[in-house]
Image (cartoon, grey):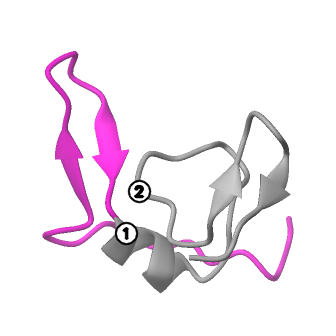
Amino acid sequence: MNRLKKNLKPIEGDYYLTPEGYRCFTEQYHLRRGYCCESGCRHCPYGYDKKTNQYTKK
C-alpha cells in the first residue's frame, strides 16, 4: 500500500451523482486528497490533460 495516498471518506460537497448514476468528485475533494490521480477527472484542479498526458497551468 502506498503510504503517500490518503484514504479519505467523502464528506458533503465532495461529489455529486451524474445522470448515469456515477459519483463525480468535485474540486473540493481533489484538493483535500492532495494529489492528481491522472485519470482525467472532470473537476481536476491540477490541470492534468489525459489526452496529452501533461499538466497545464491553472
Mark before the other along the chain sequence, 1 or 2: 1
* Place of residue 23 in the rendered image (x, y in percent of width and height, measured from the top left): 30, 39
* Place of residue 27 in the rendered image (x, y in percent of width and height, measured from the top left): 37, 69
> Which quarter of the picture shows residue 10?
bottom left
In this rendering, the answer to whether 12 lies above or below 41 is below
Please check the rendered image and state whether residue 8 is part of the magenta-colored stretch, yes or no.
yes
In the drawing, does residue 10 fall left or right of residue 17?
A: right
- The residue beneath circle 2 is 43
Q: Nearer the viewer, residue 46 or 6?
A: 46
Q: Which residues are magenta?
A: 1-26
* Place of residue 53 in the rendered image (x, y in percent of width and height, measured from the top left): 85, 46
Q: Which disc is residue 27 wearing?
A: 1
Q: Which kind of residue does numbered mark 2 sit on?
A: His
In this rendering, the answer to whether 27 lies above or below 31 is above
Residue 40 showing in the rendered view? yes
> Which quarter of the picture shows residue 20?
top left
* Place of residue 12 in the rendered image (x, y in percent of width and height, measured from the top left): 13, 70
